[in-house]
Amino acid sequence: METAPEPATDTAAETGYAKINVALHVRARRDDGYHALESLFVFAEHGDGVQGVATDDGAIDLTIDGPFAAGLDAGADNLVMRAARRLQGWIGEQRGAAIRLTKCLPVASGIGGGSADAAATLRLLVRLWDVRIAPEELAALALDIGSDVPACIASVTQMVAGRGETLARHAVEGLEGMPILLVNPGVAVSTARIFAGWDRVDRGPLNAGSIAALRDEGRNDLQPAALAAAPVIGDVLSMLREQPGASIVRMSGSGATCFALFDDPAMLGAAARALATERPDWWIMETRIRSA
């Protein structure tokens, strides 16, 4: 059954919500070179901004601004451009768009910034171009762009398996709306290098039945390789664990962004101020886990 997009307009805006892997279990390396994962994805209420204006000349123009704009190129390899071109090719029409990406999330930081931006671009252009596309077709198109892009389309709490093609909405009592603190020490790490550094030990499946299970049994199997590549990640984790009220403390994705969950937003605020005072060079974002 096809989705029924909102009526087309001349302009639109979307958010590329920051993605957080509350736990990430690597189970195997597949024959196709990808890794078989089990992960609980959640999304922050904040992220990058994507705005667009529809055009009829077939051109896709991208401009980038924001605090992390310098880390990106607006050329054909940018995931926003790839998403726009992929959807343009799917509809088979010369619809165009002028897109502005406001980059608020650090680049190559393990919180899905590029994938979230690509997904936001797809959502934006589906509206701008009045595209009628079935959810499964949009998911397949998104997977061609990147493994995390399908999950970022809905940007809701999901269990993700395989290389990112198996998605299931997954509610964990008390998790959505929970305050979360994101911290990045200002280093970019290579996703390919971190996956290559995985020790190939299958430490078992992911139990995402409760917050307690995620805390006590969950893990990020890429964390050891990331610590070897960027030891400062260990400093971030240590400082987060020292903060009163911090619950789950872990690295997200392939790093270097780490997170801490809090029950009390006041404690989160106090932790953010403490870290900002001690490490003013680190990127810190106070937010909540996005609800559906």
Image (tube, helix red, strand yellow):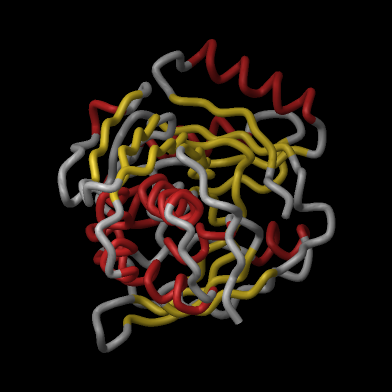
Quadrant of the image containing the C terminus: bottom right
In this view, 157 is above or below 3: above
Quadrant of the image containing the N terminus: bottom right
Position of residue 105 in the picture relative to residue 34 (left or right): right
- Residue at the outermost bottom position: 31
Q: Residue at x 43, y 62 (%)?
A: 148
| Rendering coords of residue 173 (x, y %) | 83, 59
Position of residue 101 in the picture relative to residue 213 (left or right): left
Q: Is residue 26 visible?
A: no
Q: Residue at x 74, y 65 (%)?
A: 213
Position of residue 154 in the picture relative to residue 54 (left or right): right
Q: Is residue 264 visible?
A: yes
Q: Residue at x 29, y 30 (%)?
A: 64
In this view, 41 is above or below 261: below
Position of residue 232 in the picture relative to residue 57 (left or right): right
Q: Residue at x 28, y 45 (%)?
A: 189
| Rendering coords of residue 163 (x, y %) | 40, 75
| Rendering coords of residue 252 (x, y %) | 49, 50
How many callouts does the rendering have? 0
Out of 48 and 228, give the one closest to the viewer.
48
| Rendering coords of residue 284 (x, y %) | 52, 26
- Residue at the outermost front position: 56
Out of 220 and 114, give the one closest to the viewer.
114
